[in-house]
Amino acid sequence: MLRARQKIGKYRIVSRIASGPLADVYAAYDTIHKQRVALKIPRESRHTGHEEFLHEVQVAVKLKHPNILSVLNASYIDGRFVIAMELGEKSLAERQERRISTARATDLAGQALAALAHAHERKIIHCDIKPENFILFPGNQLKLADFGFAKISLRTLKASGSGTIDYIAPEQAMGRPKFQSDVFSLGLVIYRLFSGKLPDWPFEWPLKGFDRLQARVRPEIVELLKNAIQLDPAKRYPTAIEMHADFERLKSHARKQKRTRRRNGKSYAKGYGTSWRQLQWRQFQRQFKKALDTRHHCRRCEGPVSESMQACPWCGIDTPARGCESSLPSSCPRCERGVKNDWDYCPWCYGPGFVEETTREYPDKRYTARCTNTRCRGNLMPFMRYCPWCRMKVKRRWKLPGSGKQCESCRWGIAAEFWNYCAWCREPVRRE
């Protein structure tokens, strides 16, 4: 397992993105090209070599499409096989933890279909379609990743003999993948995208979450998904090419109907539908955004949060800013919050130290206090839980500028007139 700031060739590790039984994926910085990349490094195993990953690279370079993840480089570095790829913001699986509007879900579904249709046009069966293998980039661009795992997946699934594993089609679970298997898996991905639920075996209609699906999409889209999620492969779309064509035709028809309704005078005034919660968030941001640096959105309720918060002050979920892009240059592999390159420890969680990259200390206007450890006296930023220089627990009771209220449990400053929970200890806020 590589550590933050460790160097491997021209790449400097920033943080670990994901870890699996076959490979680890890291966010890294290319010191020559001056860009952030994702590094996929296979784990050494008696059962798998580098042949499967070589196959993945060879397949990926044949596919040139805006919705397919590009491989930037692949080589052996210090005895490790390293695949460098484009670095996205988060996976579709992470994005699904937050609410998604119907318009956004429709756009993402179209991009996913376009990517798989392009692969099927090149006679390539992906065999591992799932939300974790779709990566989101700025501008809500979706890209399909992880080509070339078919052999590994088939060996595992054939041995298990099960057809109930996540997004796997029944025939693929028995070791007989087809183009229709990818169609089935993507049908489940899109179904969950709209309904928020993943159906289970035996996939009998109406599936789990069907009521919400009907409420959010047109009946034609429901029929499209029914055709994709059929137990008999012969009853599904033969490839994603036909499924994508039908989906785009239905989207075009829906846009025409929407334009017709607007011409008939059924348009809505600007600002219609703004909820009281959104108005509350706007007022909170005007008052506390600068003090709290609430530039991120909660991964569940989408309320304004900062990466220093331990809990969402609106819905109470832990680490609400997980997966958000930090303004700091690196991130902690354990809690995924941002860290500065001259810090020795993560100030947000009690994790292990970092590989020393520099002895220089960088000034920062956000430093407002000092560590109480007489041997350290390092600079501290508001709401740090641990000193980034000596890892000593911060005893200071942080105040919130602009608010005189304190949490009854941890005594840190809170915006009591807005919050439902303390952002630092998750204690429910009592309003007088």
Image: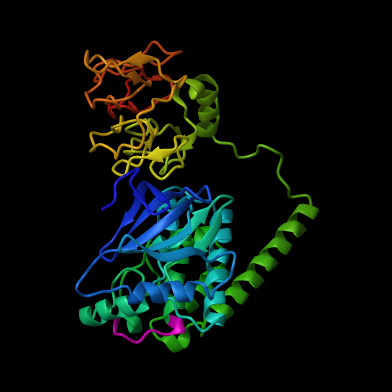
x, y percentage for residue 431?
Answer: 36, 18
Q: Residue at x 34, y 84 (%)?
A: 171
x, y percentage for residue 376?
Answer: 25, 18
Q: Is residue 175 magenta?
A: yes
Does residue 147 appear to the left or right of 2 in the view shown?
A: right
Q: Is residue 46 magenta?
A: no
Please say whether residue 283 is visible from this viewpoint.
Answer: yes
Up-down: is 390 above or below 150?
above
The C terminus lies in quadrant = top left
x, y percentage for residue 257?
Answer: 71, 62
Up-down: is 31 above or below 418?
below
Q: Residue at x 29, y 71 (%)?
A: 165
Q: Residue at x 35, y 17 (%)?
A: 413
Up-down: is 261 above or below 420?
below
Colour treatment of the image: rainbow
How many marks the image carries: the answer is 0
Q: Predominant secondary structure in magenta?
A: loop
The extreme bottom residue here reads 234
The extreme top residue here reads 404
The extreme right residue here reads 263
Nearer to us in this view, 202 or 48: 48
Question: Residue 336 occupies which quadrant of the picture?
Answer: top left
Does residue 400 appear to the left or right of 281 in the view shown?
A: left
x, y percentage for residue 35?
Answer: 52, 49
Question: Residue 233 occupies which quadrant of the picture?
Answer: bottom left
In magenta, the rendered stretch is 173-180
Question: Residue 381 occupies which quadrant of the picture?
Answer: top left
Please say whether residue 202 is visible from this viewpoint.
Answer: no
Q: Residue at x 47, y 64 (%)?
A: 73
Nearer to us in this view, 55 or 284: 55
Up-down: is 125 above or below 216?
below
